[in-house]
Image (cartoon, grey):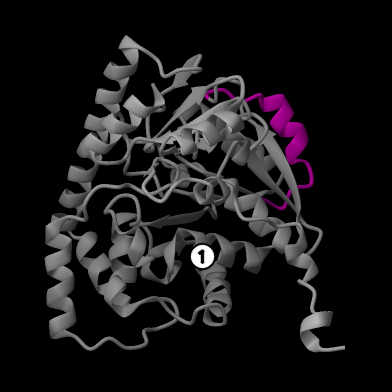
Amino acid sequence: MTFAASWTEARRLQSIELSLIRQVMQSAPPNAINLALGELGFAMPSALKEQAIRLLNEGNPAYTPNAGLPELRFAVAETHKALPEEVLITNGAEEAVFIALLSILNPGDVIAIPDPDYTAYPAIARILDAQVRRLPFGENFTTIDWENWERLLAGCKVIILSAPSNPSGFCFSDETATRFAELVQRHSTLVIVDEIYSRLWFDETPLSLETYIPNLIRIGGLSKSHLLSGWRLGWIIAPQRLCLSFTKARQYISTCSNWLSQKLATFALSDEGLQLAESVRLQLKANRDWLRCCFSVALPARINALHFPPATPYILMKTPEPLPYCQQAAQNGVVLVPGQAFGQQSQGWVRLNFGVEIKMLNRAIELLA
């Protein structure tokens, strides 16, 4: 028997499929308007492009330290009230999630994940042979059944969540952050918070959990805030003893991050670079306001309700048959994501990413109508 004939996929991957987001995308025509991916479709700021060219002309790309360039670690630490020794630079936020979970979870450990939340969290946990326990939000995505979460968190080693939440945009208030901190402290549960959407807010800056939870592990990056998704630049902020473990794991996953991406990220976190992020936020807010006005006149066909969150580039649209709706929308030239991709609580919803150029968004709404 030849190797090819006897080969079988590793067991850790046999229960894993491409995310529903990618599956829906594959069924769409090549010229479809993509409102499915978690990526803003605005043009990269010209100041960032010009800075990248200068850096490349003046520098010599090479391997960097496993934990990242010292100047970038300092910049991340400074903007997040941390120490450089507590920062690990990664290839995007998703690699940061993988590194953190790989370093913490043993086979059989229980990990808690809110429902709904980002699709990669349970998939990575299952690859690592961990047991996944979902913590449901209320039906309107803005409330938490604390007694239920108390019961479900028993025995959980880790909880990972996005805040602001993907896809619901849930943001903590002082009251909910305090209750959440008390809850995880009672269960001695380690908290990993993915803050990738923290700069994409509309009316009020999202509250950070850093002042509420000791030994918090924070994940972030520049893909959303600076339109640098293709540059694959993220980070982990964690207590130094954990950061050392993460760095050790990272060495054998991807060694280090791209030299040019790190150099550009250092500029992106400067005062000038953060002004560029603010312009992205305002552009996104203008889209949200336009869409809200548009939907106040008429909802798209077969849509019964809308959920506009206080942050993130998404809205949720309620429809009786989300998957057939997305399939029909894709055939009509608009790619959306059925809410079931993110958990049970969002099964009756469809996620729409409104972070694209306004002309494209307008055309997509016309096609949905």
Q: Residue at x 66, y 26 (%)?
A: 146
On the image, which quarter does residue 293 sit in?
top left
- The magenta-colored residue range is 142-158
Which residue matches tag 1? 95
The correct choice, above or below, for 320 with respect to 361 in the image is above
Closer to us: 169 or 85: 169
Image side of residue 160 versus residue 289, left or right: right
Q: Quadrant of the C terminus?
A: top left
Closer to us: 194 or 81: 194
Outermost residue toward the right in this view? 1
Q: Residue at x 16, y 65 (%)?
A: 49
Outermost residue toward the top in this view? 297
Closer to us: 94 or 238: 94
Given the image, on which type of amino acid does mark 1 rest? Glu
Image side of residue 139 versus residue 275, left or right: right
Q: Residue at x 63, y 68 (%)?
A: 103
Residue 106 visible to the viewer? no
Disc 1: CA contacts within 10 A as few (<14), some (14-19) or many (>=20) = many
Horizontal and vertical percent position of residue 81 = 34, 55
